[in-house]
Amino acid sequence: MTAQVPESSATELVHLDVGDAVATITLDSPHNRNALSRQLVAELFERLEAAAADETVRVVVIRSSGRVFCSGADLSEASTEGMEVGARRIVALQRLIVTMSKPVVVEVGGPVRAGGIGIVAAADIAVAAEDASFALTEVKLGLAAAIISLTVLHRMNSRAAALTTLGGEVFSGTDAAAYGLVTSAVPADRLTEEVAALCASLATGAPQGLRESKRILNASLVARIDAGGEEMAALSASLFASEEAKAAMTAFLTRTS
């Protein structure tokens, strides 16, 4: 039997389904390719907190309804409203994923960019399709991967981090596994099956064992977020507010509109 959180409105962007000890959180904002808008981030917070509070849940999965996992920050909002609040909220989102008492798994079937990679890196386990695509595109817009560096640099090896952060170029799911960003990359037609099997295995863990094991594993990452979160949020906000970044974002939005 599957339980589902009631929809508060027809425009819900993040859905939660619970069944067989697994909470599946689905990003469903196709109009902006699951960009990290205020609404999507707020709903993702709510779904994660609901999963954390549900005693029947042992494992949490974050996935997308369509091929695109997440396109990063909502540039339309950022270019007009700034990122003072949004940057801190994304830092808090990463911290929530890292500190939840239950393992968080991400399923990446397609493109993920910039801020979306912070969600991937914050998760305990990440499984990607071999042909999924990743890119830390901030450098192309006069920005830096600041707030997501808290988790991304904890996962990736330093040479790969330099290559992807400074270059901003697209790399594959297979590359992401080699770089340490994701746990494994599998053929696209096996992705859902692999994630389901992984979650079934994780769900056999006892709640206390899962909670304490995750706390030990993530202690240094939590410390990293707490030590650098405010600095990285402030840096991100200042970069988004710069004239160079505003011009680059306007040009990008014009090209893609």
Image: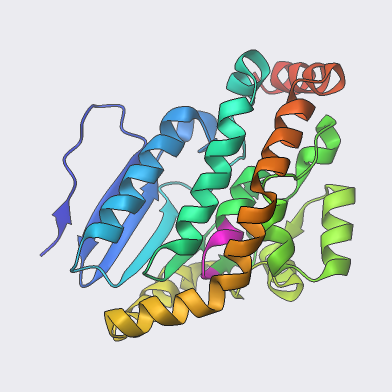
- Total labels: the figure holds 0
Res 111 visible = no
Looking at the image, residue 210 sits to the left or right of residue 3; the answer is: right
Res 75 visible = yes
Q: Nearer the viewer, residue 204 or 214?
A: 214
Looking at the image, residue 40 sits to the left or right of residue 226; the answer is: left
* Residue 215 position (above or below residue 233): below
Residue 62, x across and y down, in percent = 42, 57
* Residue 68 position (above or below residue 61): above
Residue 238, x across and y down, in percent = 76, 27
Residue 257, x across and y down, in percent = 64, 18
Q: Identify which residue is drawn at 82% across, 61% down.
A: 161
Q: Nearer the viewer, residue 65 or 122?
A: 122
Residue 155, x across and y down, in percent = 69, 68
- Image quarter hosting the N terminus: bottom left
| Quarter of the rendering containing residue 59 | bottom left
| Quarter of the rendering containing residue 70 | top right
Q: Identify which residue is drawn at 37% across, 35% down.
A: 13
Magenta range is: 120-126
* Residue 100 position (above or below residue 80): below
Looking at the image, residue 221 sits to the left or right of residue 66; the answer is: right
In the image, residue 178 lies in the stretch drawn in magenta: no
In the image, residue 125 lies in the stretch drawn in magenta: yes
| Quarter of the rendering containing residue 201 | bottom left
Q: Nearer the viewer, residue 241 or 14?
A: 241
Q: Identify which residue is drawn at 40% across, 40% down.
A: 28
